[in-house]
Image (cartoon, helix red, strand yellow):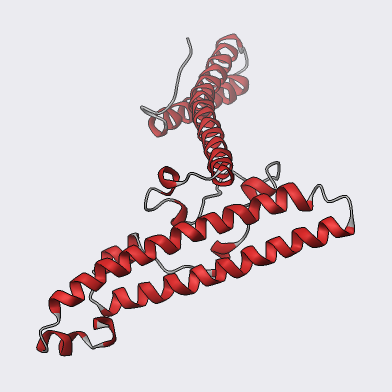
């Protein structure tokens, strides 16, 4: 194979065309491996959710563990084949941007069973993200598997819910900015009224100091939250 020859030697031997052809073949091999990897991980997640949780006997639990083990072996096989294809692409001169953004290195922690399916009600889901290989090669368009349809459906609904929560939180923060400024102004007006009603010099001095203090708070808040806050009149 041209990938087994050093790039400089291959150019000297006139194997540039063959290397370009093999590079495209290795990309196809990597895509196929990622496709099978996604399917295996999705199946393993569904096995954990539907079989381990509902196992009503030792025999059922043992059978589910055997199915999960077969999925695990398939996952490791897909990863090894993908890593070999990626290594060949590096030797064939694939550009660094492609290797960094599309055909990335697969890390062990990215192969865990997706908790969006197995633990859908857990805490701390606000910053969860699927591993990179779920978002490349139009994986969600090429699946014709009921298991994978369920997997992508759950993750899409979770992502939509997170987006809506973030949107709601943003609007709340913007309102809180306006409420903060309004509170500072209210306190300033309250102390200004006390200043006008005070009869003793000491009381007037203290009230005037509070007016300046809350006025400075309001001005600083308005400058900090400019064009960000929502003010409800």
**Res 124 visible:** no
Residue occupying image coordinates x 45% and y 73%: 81
Q: In this view, does 28 lie to the left or right of 146?
A: left
Residue occupying image coordinates x 66% and y 49%: 46
Q: In this view, does 83 lie to the left or right of 183?
A: left
Q: Is residue 156 left or right of residue 116?
A: left
**Res 76 visible:** yes
Residue occupying image coordinates x 49% and y 70%: 79
User: Residue 17 at x, y = what percent?
Assistant: 13, 75
For this rendering, which residue is in front, 224 or 159? 159
Q: Residue 219 occupies which quadrant of the picture?
A: top left
Residue occupying image coordinates x 63% and y 57%: 113
User: In the figure, 169 relative to 129: above or below?
Assistant: above
User: Residue 129 at x, y = what percent?
Assistant: 52, 50
User: Residue 102 at x, y = what percent?
Assistant: 34, 60
User: In the figure, 80 relative to 208: above or below?
Assistant: below
Looking at the rendered image, the quarter that the N terminus falls into is bottom left
User: In the figure, 160 relative to 60: above or below?
Assistant: above
User: Residue 24 at x, y = what percent?
Assistant: 25, 66
For this rendering, which residue is in front, 129 or 139? 139
């Amino acid at each position: 194979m041209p990938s087994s020859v050093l790039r400089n030697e291959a150019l000297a031997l006139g194997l540039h065309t063959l290397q370009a052809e093999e590079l495209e073949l290795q990309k196809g091999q990597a895509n196929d491996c990622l496709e099978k990897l996604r399917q295996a991980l999705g199946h393993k997640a569904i096995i954990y959710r539907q079989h381990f949780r509902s196992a009503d006997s030792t025999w059922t639990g043992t059978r589910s563990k055997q199915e999960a083990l077969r999925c695990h072996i398939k996952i490791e096989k897909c990863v090894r084949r993908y890593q070999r294809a990626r290594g060949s692409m590096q030797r064939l001169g694939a550009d660094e941007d492609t290797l960094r953004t599309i055909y990335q290195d697969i890390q062990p922690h990215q192969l865990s069973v997706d908790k969006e399916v197995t633990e859908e009600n857990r805490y701390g889901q606000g910053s969860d993200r699927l591993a990179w290989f779920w978002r490349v090669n139009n994986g969600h368009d090429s699946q014709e598997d009921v298991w994978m349809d369920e997997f992508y459906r759950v993750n899409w609904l979770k992502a939509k819910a997170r987006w809506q929560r973030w949107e709601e939180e943003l609007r709340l923060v913007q309102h809180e900015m306006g409420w903060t400024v309004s509170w500072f102004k209210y306190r300033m007006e309250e102390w200004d009224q006390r200043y006008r009603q005070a009869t003793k010099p000491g009381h007037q001095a203290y009230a005037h100091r509070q007016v300046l203090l809350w006025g400075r708070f309001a001005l600083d808040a308005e400058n900090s939250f400019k064009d960000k806050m929502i003010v409800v009149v």
